[in-house]
Image (cartoon, rainbow, N blue to C red):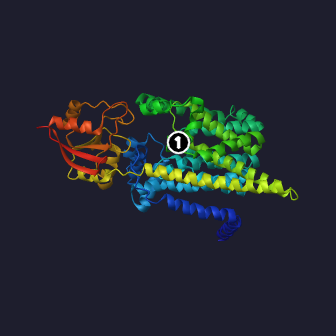
Amino acid sequence: MQLFTNWKRSLGISFLHRLRRLDKWRLCLIVYAITYGCILAINLSSAAMEWDEVSHFTGGLLLSRGQFGTWITTNSLYPPIYDVFAAFYYLIIGPSVFAARLVADTFSVLSLFVVFEIGNRLYDKRTALVSALLFSVMPGIIWLSRLAMIETMLIFIFSVSMLFFFSWLRTNQERDRIISVAAFAVGVAVKYQVLVVVPLIMLLGMFFWKRDYLKTQLRSCLRLPRLAVIALTIGVAAIILYELSTSGILSLLIYTIREGTAQKAFYSQQYPMPIFYFVEMTWFNNIVQPISLLLYLIALGGIGLMVYRRKREDKFLLLWFAVVYVVFTLIPNKDWRYVTIAFPVLAISASTLLLASFDKLKKIGATAEKNLTKRTVSKIGAGLLVALVATGFVYSCVNAYNWQVQNGFQVPVEQATNFATKNLSENQSIVVACPVNSFNQYMVWFYSYLKNPNQNYSQVWQYPSLAADAYTPDFNVSQFSMLSQQHNVKYVLIYEFGDLQYFGSTLTAQDVCGSLNQTGKFTLQATFGNQANRIFIYSYSPQK
């Protein structure tokens, strides 16, 4: 009873302590974060599904229904944490595209608080709040917050690890080191590349600021029992690598990291390797800017200020940014999403430059009481600085909105799937012809499995097996007809998006439909969607 009383008293003291920390800056952040999260959730399920999302849709669905064996055979190639959270959200609000995407929305909101805490611990509350605001309006962050992708979760976990690692460097509290390492371990289960980036930052951080500690730890690794643990870990890792190698999974992982798709390989060569991400972070194409150009230039100016000042806090953020940039620059397969874990650094660097400039102008005005010219110049400068920030903020929001509009089209996957799976027998199958990013077999299987938990995974397949908008498709109608007969196909689904030509060819969806019509074995049964954005459903009759 006494133990319970002490625990309640301790809990009450802890709560009061946290309540006292809730100052005006944090209150502003809480109100803004709640509003921000609600805005992100508007029409969250309206946009077309992305190929990279579907593994989390289906993975979460399998886990929520306790089908761990099926999940292992179909989804275990990907890190599991997002699937776990998707399953949790499914259990709470029901399985849907909205629920799976709400996970990304949640972690985007949580990331604002981590960015705030990093800015606060390294600098001050003003810098913290401005950093969180700038981070929140980055168009790339807004786009990722509305899709069931891992990036917002990764940013949150990665930033937590960096926050507590820096706290440990400063205070030497063991609790901070443990939390940092624990966050790193969770981060590995979000994205495997974390296994390289975080240890590099930690090792270099200890080399620069805790060299004696690093030497002590390295010496202890050469003695028992740590030596035995290291040897056992290496042995287990070797066995796992051998199993992955013999199964072919390791080769697939290496290819994915090095090349990705044919379209990705082409994309990764559009700029020289050393400057690829410098350009790509702000100029993905003529419409899309992951970080709007004005805020990006301010952020780069802030990086320059950090290099000039060389405070310990500045050096840590520079180390964070440099390691992320260099590691992903050296990986041949490139995508701006890979370096989003450096976006908090850019938000904080932009904030430091803006506030340092404002403080400088304020100081000039305060020390020039009798100099009317200096006072006037300082006031004009401060006004222009505020206007610059407001313009950058609004421009970034507009850029994010345009990005959402550009990707706001809907693909009637659910309607087409419901039609195709109606009265589908166990020995029949559905095939998606020429799958693309917005329509493939995994999306069809998700909706069919959503309605029918007994749906066999092999009842939905696609031809060709690779994405037609990422690899040059080899569509052979004779082979397709033969495979359709072998798989006892009932329906063929084809997605048309305007006059889109498949990657590296002049072939279009209409060309594929024409080839099917010429065989006499495929008959158009239904069409879902509007012209230039629709799904055709053909029935297959091998006897014709």
The type of residue carrying mark 1 is Arg
Q: Is residue 14 left or right of residue 252?
A: right
Q: Is residue 522 left or right of residue 253?
A: left
Picture quadrant where residue 440 is located: top left
- For this orientation, the residue located farthest to the right is 370
Query: For the C terminus, which image quadrant?
Result: top left
- Does residue 3 lie above or below 388 as drawn? below
- Does residue 85 lie above or below 299 as drawn? below
Is residue 360 among what the camera can see?
yes
Frontmost residue, 432 versus 202: 432
Frontmost residue, 459 versus 41: 41
- Does residue 261 lie above or below 359 as drawn? above
- For this orientation, the residue located farthest to the front is 373
Query: Which residue: 35% across, 47% down?
Result: 443
Query: Which residue: 73% across, 42% down?
Result: 306
The percent position of residue 285, horizontal first and vertical second, equals 49, 40
Q: Is residue 273 left or right of residue 426?
A: right
The percent position of residue 113, horizontal first and vertical second, equals 62, 56
Badge 1, how many Cα within 10 Å: few under 14, some, many 20+? Answer: some
Q: Is residue 265 left or right of residue 476?
A: right
Label 1 element class: helix
Is residue 161 among what the camera can see?
no
Q: Which residue is mark 1?
A: 337
The percent position of residue 427, horizontal first and vertical second, equals 20, 44
Picture quadrant where residue 69 is located: top left
Query: Which residue: 49% across, 54% down?
Result: 103
Frontmost residue, 506 versus 34: 506
